[in-house]
Amino acid sequence: MIRLKKPWIGRFKKSTDKLVEKFTASINFDCRLYYHDIKVSIAHAKMLEIVGLLTSKESKLIINGLKEIEKDINNEKIKWFIKLEDVHMNLEVNLIKKIGNIGKKIHTGRSRNDQISTDIRLYLREEIDKIKLKITTLRKRLIKLAISESDTIMPGFTHLQIAQPVTFGHHLLAWHEMISRDHSRILECRKRINILPLGSAALAGTTYPINRNLIKELLGFDNITENSLDAVSDRDFAIEFTSFSSILLMHLSRMCEELILWTSLPFDFIELPDFLCTGSSIMPQKKNPDIPELIRGKTGRIYGNLLNLLVLMKSQPLAYNKDNQEDKEPLFDTTETVKNCIDNFIKIITNLKIKPKKMYLSALCNYSTATDFADYLVKRGVPFRDAHSIVGKVVYYGIKNKKNFNEIYLDNLRNFYNKIDEELLEVLTLEGSINTRNHIGATAPSQVRSAALRAKKYLKKLLG
Ligand code: ARG
């Protein structure tokens, strides 16, 4: 039988109210950090031995005990107790049960305050490394698709009105740019997360001759925190991670919104395979893009988590406050949601059926080469503002007479400007339009291909 004694029992005459016990406990969710907590305790025990605070026999006993507990947890042999409040106290009591009184020495020179901050940082570092890999895969898929779709013409939109023709590859590279900035954001965020708070103890440091640098090395942190008060109370690294997540999800939601529009019949630019869609329980004909809709929906949840953490930290005096226990659930939810959303988005992007003909026909609408027409006039000496007005009149004439540019005869066009020649016909084609937007950052197929190759190169460099 395990003795469920609270460590602060000496100071208290009465045991904790059951309602309060339940309210203050975090074990139901922070038990998830057992692996990280054990890792931190093992490093701490090694350090205590090296600085002479534990004998090597004691530290061996503690470390082996912790390793056995880890196995027990993996084999579901450990029961978590609300009475023991959190993962730290549950593990400590289990250690004492397993190895006896020596287990009582593990908490020398540390506090749950620096312990939990270290645990979360370790946890987030691991999650970030998984997310980084997923982002890399997503970037590779987008670049690959952009290359194969570098010639595919589609309408480009502003205000969701057909504006100018673009290449689908160019559109995909726009998505890639968003994700590449998210990629650099998470790499920056990781740097600030990978700093060791352990050794700060409760708030002021400890009287023991600890070696923080040693723990830093053992746990693979890049640096140690500079101020113990800040180290135990700071959660801005978690806010930064959730902020990165919010921006990433914002980007994914924009892409998803486009995918949803494109699968709808009025657009009909793409089709999603059956195995990635769902049907309707009442309307037999329906095939719904649930994945992109859900990613769009889950974005709100991540923003909620960000706001949650921001408000949680607002106005908190130094140093640790129990409020901080509330950081875990939004954080866990954020890491899970982000991983799921990227995985599902990758699935979608890898299995798109693209309908280039539909895209092309749509790009032909709404006088999408009107700007090219105006540019043609400018190149023949007409000031741009006058050129804009002349083309505006042609467009108005076309709308009135239900004629597209290519359905208006040259003679007729010359009524709007008398020096128009045959060359205009090529200028007004979709191909003419995209091919002449031929500079870095523009939509011409050759530019898209070189931009994609550059993106590939940068990504490779980033991955080292
Ligand atoms: N469960 C606590 C948390 O998640 C651990 C730190 C508790 N510290 C304390 N002084 N009560 O923040």
Image (cartoon, rainbow, N blue to C red):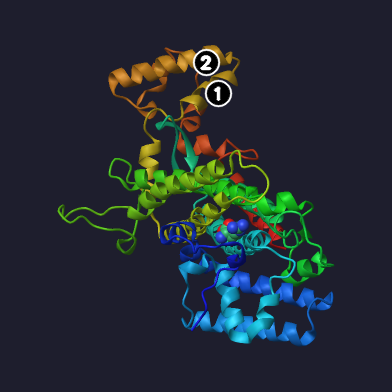
Sequence-earlier tag: 2 or 1:
1
| Front residue of this view, candidates 274 and 76 | 76
Q: Given the image, on which type of amino acid does mark 2 rest?
A: Ala
For label 2, the residue is 387
- Residues at marks 2 and 1 touching, judged by CB atoms closer than 8 Å: yes
Badge 2 element: helix
136 left or right of 276 in image: right
| Front residue of this view, candidates 405 and 45 | 45
Q: Where does the image place residue 92, in percent across and percent down from the top left?
A: 60, 74
Q: Residues within 10 Å of mark 1 (few under 14, many from 20)?
A: some
Q: Is residue 207 above or below residue 360?
A: below
> Ligand 1 appears in which quadrant?
bottom right
For label 1, the residue is 375
212 left or right of 413 in image: right
Can residue 92 be seen here?
Answer: yes
Q: Is residue 73 above or below residue 159?
A: below
Q: Where does the image place residue 147, in percent across and percent down from the top left?
A: 55, 54
300 left or right of 88 in image: left
Instruction: Please give the name of the residue rendered at 68% of the width and 60% of the height, measured from the top-left corner.
Output: 114
Q: Compute the Cα span from label 2 to label 1.
A: 8 Å
